[in-house]
Image: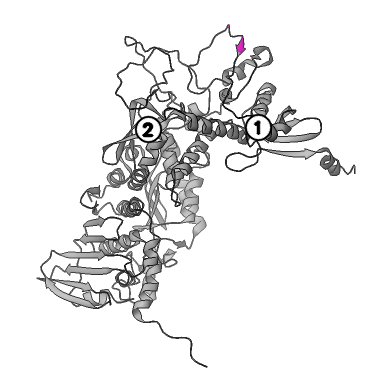
Amino acid sequence: MTPVIHILDAHSANQIAAGEVVERPASVVKELVENSIDAGAKHIDISIEGNGVPMIRVRDDGCGIGTKDLPLAVIRHATSKITTIEDLDHLKTLGFRGEALPSIASVSRLQISSRPADEVAGLSLTLNDAGQGEYEEIGCPIGTTVTVRDLFFNTPARLKFLKSTPTEFGLISDTIGRIALAHPEIAFTLTHPSQIVLQTTGRGDLREAIAAVLGHSIARQLLPITARHEKWQLEGFISPPNLVRSSKQSQYFMLNGRTVRSSILSRALTEGYHTLIPVKLHPIVVLHLTVSPGDYDVNVHPTKMDVRFKEEQGLSQFIKEAVYHTLLNSKPLPSMQTQPTQTTKSNNPTPVSFSRPESPARPLSSYSDLKLRESELPIPPVINSGQSVKSNQTKTYEQPKIDFLHQLPINEKKLNSLPQETMLSLDSLDKKKVDQIQPIGAEYQKDDQIKSLKIENQKDIILNTSAGESLNHMWPLTQLFNTYILATDGKVLIMIDQHAAHERINYERLLKEFKAADQFSQTLLIPIPMEFTLQEEQVLLENLWILNEMGFIIEQFGSRTYLLRGIPVQTGSFQADEMLRQFIENVLMKDSPPTFDKILEEWIYMLACKESIKAQDSLNLPEMEQLIASLSRTENPYTCPHGRPTMVTMTRSELEKRFYRT
């Protein structure tokens, strides 16, 4: 039999290994910067061209590579970090396998220039396409410079699957940002191609590094955390309960100076914030964990990002208690911003001078009023169309304070968007519930002489008798668990999810409004400054034209700071900057390439969900009737925009089977 097993040549083996270590340009940057840190560098400069494929250069002032060691540095499994497997139990460096440089060299054109402090001249090594090295003695400063050109030039399949330039550079900048947070004692500079994108001082101040990476606004609000145990030490900063994000993108875990991913650490953090923040929101944290090298294993993934701990349960409890007690001891009293953004509809942004109008104050009446805000900027109230602005009258709006440990849920009725052809008499409504139906962002006016509540008729909801015919003869019986509406026509019993149903109603209404709109933007009278992280900024720039088409007016205002001058007309009275930031995190930062239609659809999804009745909102019978009638007028009353069913049915025969009557 002819032998079929053979040994791969070194170049092919390195290219295959590169697939594990070098996934994309950000992987190259990570490996080179970690080598610089292991070399004891105090200043590391990273230069990027394009998406990282044309050129990546990392320059440091570390110990350098000796003349005799440089040829060995590009040989697979050649390392200065360990000599035996037992050394992993005492490992203090970020790298140890000796795979990075040979893997990078196998898929790029690599040049290394280095000089140790005890040598007069430096040595340059240039690897050609065949992997052969050319050496040249040069003059260079102490340290090492690694230049990677034409990445993936010999692996076109890998090159084809790279994302756009802003996306790839966003991943590179996010990688550098995470490493900079792990090592505030090192000065990092990231340029692209000649513009400085990120720069840290290297003075060892973690809050200062956070300000450079995440922004000054976030850095000022974070709470310091310090906890010690005989086996573990935890230091860093965590966000107060009123500073949260909709994704875990801003959670940074460092283990002995190494950026890591760990479900154990993430779960412990979530448990530490349990009952202090809503379940679907996530805090911003930068946590440094110090553990003995023998108590964890970092050699479980080629990128050394995933780790395993020996005492997972004990470590998790330690982090949970440290986070929880830090939050309680800080006794934060978050400032509640209840006033929505002032807007005026316009096709073009124009500067407007104004003074705040005199208007009666209104109490907090909805969950939206209690929504915790990141920004500390005062937000003016909405000026309704036709309302005159009195320049000689001004009023100070104070933001109410509330202890996050004692928030009381307040029911909210967002039924202002539901169509109704008749007037609802107050004789049939409880007065408290009438107040709760007050639309969010409207001026709260209390009038003892109010005799009726009118809910505007929505003429733009498409009447589809075939789809909603089964609902036309339904009448509500009761509300179950403050979440489901039980209704019947005498023949079948239906259970309607009130949130999903209202979401479908709002989605079709908003979609029709977007298509029929003559103008797409409403200009903010006071532009809102927004500060983004490095990766968020790249995502924003990549999709800026799509956001402009949707109606957002965004202008650059400084380093990673932008002014939000206009928002889509259908945004309503929701907090504009929070909506945009949530939209960037939940939609634009997904891996799938966005299109205008897809992004617009996702935006309408978000608006429809925000405007809809929520679970646990109590409804009376007239409100249930109105909801069912509105649902019957939609094109598709059977599912919400996300595909969840709006209702389930039970026939008489099914019920009789349950009671064994058939």
The reply to whether the C-beta atoms of the residues labelled 1 and 2 are less than 8 Å apart is no
Q: Main secondary structure of the magenta part?
A: loop
Image position of 63 with respect to 659: above or below: below
Give the amino acid type for the residue marked by disc 2 in the picture.
Ser
Name the residue at the top extreme.
Answer: 449
Query: Looking at the rendering, in which quadrant would you find the C terminus?
Result: top right
Q: Quadrant of residue 360?
A: top left
Residue 378 point in image, percent of width and height: 36, 25
Identify the residue under disc 1.
464
Identify the residue under disc 2.
375
Query: Where does the magenta region start and end?
Result: 447-452
Q: Residues within 10 Å of mark 1 (few under 14, many from 20)?
A: some
Can I make out residue 598 in this image? yes
Of labels 1 and 2, earlier in sequence is 2
Residue 354 point in image, percent of width and height: 32, 17
**Residue 451 part of the magenta-drawn span:** yes
Can I make out residue 333 in this image? no
Q: Residues within 10 Å of mark 2 (few under 14, many from 20)?
A: many
Task: Say which of 146 and 69 sits in front.
Answer: 146
